[in-house]
Amino acid sequence: MTLFPDLVDGVLSESIIGRARAAGILDIRTHNIRDYTLDRHRRVDDTPYGGGMGMLMSPQPVCDCYDAVKAEIGADKRSLTVYMSPKGKVLTEQKARELSGYDSIVILCGHYEGIDQRALDMIVDEYVSIGDYVLTGGELAACVLVDAVGRLVDGVLASPVCYESESLTDGLLEYPQYTRPPVYRGVAVPEVLLSGHHANIEKWRAEQALITTERMRPDLLRKRDGDDGVIR
Ligand code: 6GU
């Protein structure tokens, strides 16, 4: 649900998510909140009571759009309504995994200075942020959410192995990877990767994941599930 459906559709029509949509694996629909306004000038915003800067999105078009979306989803689906907002909990891989378990997710994008609180209280289950900075609207954040959650849906990636070994799945960053040629501008690929010795390669990758995480994001090591402070 957005005032800028073309922005969202453009981003989510490319690459892996775009392909999954074309293949019918992901059903992603945009709904223009403006289509639901009862205002004769098609307005969707108004000045805030009590004064202050900017404009607020009015409750009527938001709630009527929501009713139409819910009718489309049907009552039998396990569905969650998320409002993209810097007030929300910051999106993590764990949160993305949790959201990927729903049958459908309704994402509400605000613009201008936000949305009338009554509409939010009536329809939103959860607020989600994508980081501690402010965007001009929720659309780009919604695209980030759909990308992060969509790729976890069965059939979107080539193989489940794609997310078993990658960054953050086990709370660690990914080990470095190399392709041909074996020497590029005088720099050789680590010897062990050319050895064909799979046990040694696995051991090297596990070590490199730890080293990379310690060097780039030491905070992630302290946050791992069941962390006892020992680096292994
Ligand atoms: Cl979800 N929305 C907006 N407007 N700004 C943000 C955000 C969301 N997450 C981080 N900044």
Image (cartoon, helix red, strand yellow):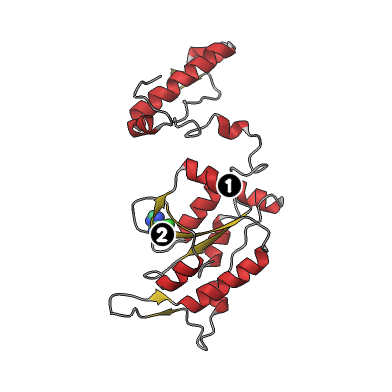
Q: Position of residue 45 (x, y in %)?
A: 43, 78
Residue occupied by mark 2: 85
67 left or right of 56 in image = right
Crowding near the residue tagged with mark 2, few <14, some 14–19, many ≥20 C-alpha atoms within 10 Å: many
Mark 1 C-beta to ligand 1 under 8 Å:
no
Type of the residue with mark 2 = Ser
Q: Quadrant of the C terminus?
A: top left
Decide if residue 99 is in sight here: yes
Residue located 66% across and 49% down the image = 19
102 relative to 228, above or below? below
- How far apart are labels 2 and 1 at the CA level? 19 Å
121 left or right of 14 in image = left
Mark 2 C-beta to ligand 1 under 8 Å:
yes
Q: Quadrant of the N terminus?
A: bottom right
- Ligand 1's image quarter is bottom left
Q: Position of residue 90 (x, y in %)?
A: 40, 49
218 left or right of 59 in image = left
Tag 1's secondary structure? Answer: loop
Q: Nearer the viewer, residue 110 or 126?
A: 126
81 relative to 215, above or below? below
Residue located 45% across and 61% down the image = 138
Give the number of marks: 2
Decide if residue 189 is in sight here: no
Residue occupied by mark 1: 100
Type of the residue with mark 1 = Ser
Tag 2's secondary structure? Answer: strand
